[in-house]
Image: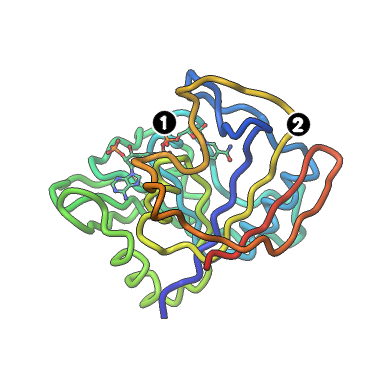
Amino acid sequence: MRPRVTVNCAMSADGKIASRERKQVRISDEEDMKRVHELRSRSDAIVVGVNTVIADDPVLTVKEKYVTEPKNPIRIVLDPRGRTPKTAKVLDGQAETIIVTTTDFQGSFDNAEVLSFGDDKIDLAALLDTLAGRGIQQVMVEGGGETIWGFFEGGLVHKFIIFVGSMIIGGASSPTPADGAGFLSGELKKMKLAAFTKTSGGIILEFEVE
Ligand SMILES: NC(=O)c1ccc[n+]([C@@H]2O[C@H](COP(=O)([O-])OP(=O)(O)OC[C@H]3O[C@@H](n4cnc5c(N)ncnc54)[C@H](OP(=O)(O)O)[C@@H]3O)[C@@H](O)[C@H]2O)c1
C-alpha cells in the first residue's frame, strides 16, 4: 500500500511561506517547532524540494531538544537535475538521505543514495510505490510550495497541516503552501477541516484530503 502522505508547513497570516527573496522566515515559534519535530520523529521519511535545500540548508533531523529518544526519518530531496550543493547539511551523514532525480541525471552524492523516476518531472507516485516496497508507511512533506503542489496535483496527499503564524509577509511573488500551476476553478481539491488548535503564536489547522 502507498505510504500515507502528510504535508506540514508554516505560513504567515496572509498565506506566504517565505519572503519574496525566497529566504527562510521564522514563522513557527518554539512551541510549534516541538510539534514539527514530534511529527518528523513519527514519520518514516521527510521530503523537501531542492530549492528549499539551496535556500534554507535544513538538516531535517529530529532534535533532542524537542523530542526525547528522537528517531530520524529518511531525508528525501526532490532534485531532478542534481543541484543539491555538495556542502548541504542533508549530506552530512547524520541520517539516511535519498536524492531523487529524473532518469537523465547520471551523477552521485557522498552520503546519499540516488533514485531516479520519470524523464521530465519526477514521478511522485512511482517514488511512493518504491518507498512502500522499503516498508515506509508515513511520509511527511515539508515544502516548499512547488514540491507540495506536486503531491496535491498527483492526488497523493492524505493530510494537510498548516501552522498560521501571527505576521504578514506580503509580496505577490512570495511562495505559498501550494504553488505550481494551481487548480482551475472547477477542479479544486476538497478537504475536510479535522481539527484546529490555538497556540501562543498562532493556530494549527489540520485538514483531511477527500
Ligand atoms: N514555511 C515553511 O513551512 C517552508 C517549508 C519549506 C520551504 N519553505 C520555503 O519555500 C521556498 C522554496 O520553495 P519552492 O517552491 O521555490 O521550491 P521547493 O519546493 O523547495 O523546490 C522546488 C524544486 O524542486 C524540484 N521538484 C519539486 N517537485 C518536483 C517534481 N515533482 N518533479 C521534478 N522536480 C521537482 C524542482 O527542481 P528544479 O528546479 O531543479 O527542476 C523544483 O524547482 C524557500 O523560500 C523556503 O524557505 C518554507
Point out residue 167 in the picture as x, y percentages from the top left corner.
72, 26
Residue 165 versus residue 104: which sits nearer the camera?
165
Q: Amino acid at mark 1?
A: Ile
Q: Is residue 201 left or right of residue 97?
A: right
In front of the other: label 2 or label 1? 2
Q: Which residue appears at 76% of the width and 31% of the height?
A: 166
- The local crowd at label 2, few if under 14, some if 14 to 19, many if 20 or more residues have their Cα within 10 Å, is some
Q: Secondary structure at mark 2?
A: loop
| Of residues 61 and 16, the one drawn nearer to the viewer in this rendering | 16
Q: Earlier in the sequence, mark 2 or mark 1?
A: 1
Asked which secondary structure carries label 1, the reply is helix
Image location of residue 115, percent across then percent down:
27, 58
Q: Residue at the location (37% across, 47% down)?
A: 184
Quarter holding the N terminus is: bottom left
Task: Give the CA distance from mark 2 to mark 1.
Answer: 26 Å
Packing grade of label 1 (10 A; few <14, some 14-19, many >=20) is some
**Residue 138 sits above or below residue 205 on the image:** below
**What residue would you read off at disc 1?**
54
Estimate the x, y position of residue 11 in percent, counting from the top left.
Answer: 62, 37
Q: Residue at x 32, y 59 (%)?
A: 124
- Relative horizontal placement of residue 73, taking residue 36 as reference (left or right): left
Q: With respect to residue 149, does 137 lie above or below?
A: below
In which image quadrant can residue 173 be found? top left
Q: What amino acid is labelled 2 in the image? A: Ser
Classify residue 165 by image quadrant.
top right
Residue hosting label 2: 166
In the image, farthest residue toward the front? 186
Seen as rendered, the residue at the extreme bottom is 1
Q: Residue at x 59, y 51 (%)?
A: 8
